[in-house]
Image (cartoon, rainbow, N blue to C red):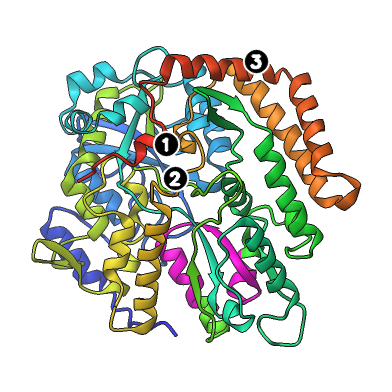
Amino acid sequence: MPSIKKQTTALCALSAAMLLSGCSFSGSPAAPGDGNSGAEHHISVSMYERGNIPEGMGTATGNMWVDWVRQHSGIDVKYIAIPRGESVPKYNMLLATGEAPDLIQEYDTRFINKLYNQKQIMPIDDLIAEHSQEYKELLGKFPMLKKLATQPDGKMYAFGRVQGYFPFTFLFIREDWLHNLNLNVPQTTDELLDVAKAFALQDPDGNGKQDTYGINMSGFAPDIINSMFQNLNWVLEDGQIVHDWQRAQAALQFKKRLFDAGAIDRDYLTDKNGKKADQDFVKGKLGLYAFAGNAKQIYDFYALLRQNDPKARIIPIALPRSPFGQFSAQFNPPFQMSGVINAQAQDPAGVMKYIDFMSKETSEKTFKFGIEGVHYRMENGVPVTLDKAKYDKEVSWLGDFRTLGAQYHMTEYEKYKQDLDLSQPFDKEVYELLNRAFELYISPQRPYAGFTLDRYMPALPNEIEFINSDNEKAIQDIWNRAILSGDGYSAEQAVQDARKAWEQGNGSKVELWYQEWYRQNKDKWVFTKDLYNIDIK
């Protein structure tokens, strides 16, 4: 069982430390926009509302750290809450009413590209040249930031952060179930199918009931399965980008076989957000768990599993080989575009000053480790957390204050590992699990399956984006129908129908656009092969 450490939160002590470091905290959330009324710059900035702020710590837009930013930056910042799961609809509404923030912080590349196409964001080249120091230096150190920020008109439109490397998607397997059924870790997709069927049909938990699933098919599982077969629509072949159907058919056939064998939850399509699959895992009913998330979520989910089944043991495994090779699914983008300036912003120079402040290494350190002497101490040049429970309550949720600039000196993944108590068996097990996952999923021997990371896909013009989106929806409906239809609708027939839908939906225009884009950008874009040759220190 995981260790339970005492929570020793001392808000008064934190308040005193904040005051000493120039930051006030009254014990109640700060009201938006009232922290620095005498400041030269007055700007608005989006802030994700994730529902993850501990009780007593305020809100996403009003808390002690909002005060800290206002007072240390000298900028009157008004934060605007954006629901994380519904960010794009919220932004669209705010833009339509003229109430969108000056700095829009968002990770959805497609949405950012749409804002560019709609001329709702401003170019930033001159702004950086005239008003930036910190971010300008970061661009000089990491030219890839400029490359990723540049739109087809040759100008930069997005700010980003340098994060370094760490996994984002994982495939876990119940190691104890493998032992119970005398099975080995699957090395190929055929072996994975056999193991998934055994987990569903051979009573791996020994309770005498057929109440387990081989693998989840909701949540991030379809992406992981598609990655095994390199089925990401577009592949590089013979020096060209082509829209592939062979891999699509192989991946579809695999999913159909899982469904037909009873190896998955037959109602998986109703699990829209993957929450039921998460519950199946923590309740000990899932043998293979395709998951996307961070190290803390892994720890928490695994801890719940162990509470429900103390004998449970999981390990990460490499995505098995398919006939097309062996690949990895998405990993965290080492460079991530994360912010754009509203074209209607009244004080772009103020936004640039804010971005410079948030890009400082000192700001990164504060939002990652907290206040020295309160949350951490320096030990051999490394910040060491003083009290993990206190850190979790007061600092751990500050990820959305780290969306810009230099964020690579210690990744969130490494920070979480560092805080584990290796004297506790469970913490040590998770530490080794996270190390193994990094080795498996950040490796040129098992490269990402796409020609570039999903976040680095090129911006499609409005017409092409419309055609592509409509086709994707129509084709996904065909895939879903084929999976659920058994022998009545073969993978071969589904692909024929999908190709026909693609042709009738003017998919050839999308293909021509990608081919021309690749011809013009093959020597200057960020491709998968480039991702493993970058030294971020």
Residue lying at 67% horizontally and 57% vertically, measured from the top left: 217
The reply to whether dot 3 and dot 2 touch (C-beta < 8 Å) is no
The reply to whether dot 2 and dot 1 touch (C-beta < 8 Å) is yes
Task: Report the residue marked by disc 1.
Answer: 528
Q: Which residues are magenta?
A: 278-303
Amino acid type shown at disc 1: Thr
Q: CA distance from mark 3 to mark 1?
A: 25 Å
User: 500 left or right of 374?
Assistant: right
**First in residue order: circle 3 vs circle 2:** 2
Task: Report the residue marked by disc 3.
Answer: 509
* Residue 197 occupies quadrant: bottom right
**First in residue order: circle 3 vs circle 1:** 3
Amino acid type shown at disc 3: Lys
* Residue 208 occupies quadrant: bottom right
Task: Report the residue marked by disc 2.
Answer: 447
Amino acid type shown at disc 2: Pro
Between 361 and 263, the residue placed more toward the observer is 263
User: 246 left or right of 50?
Assistant: right
User: 298 left or right of 192?
Assistant: left
Residue farthest along the right direction in this orientation:
488
Q: Can you give x and y, in whole percent of width and height, for residue 203 in the image?
A: 72, 81
Residue lying at 74% horizontally and 63% vertically, measured from the top left: 265
Q: Nearer the viewer, mark 3 or mark 2?
A: 2
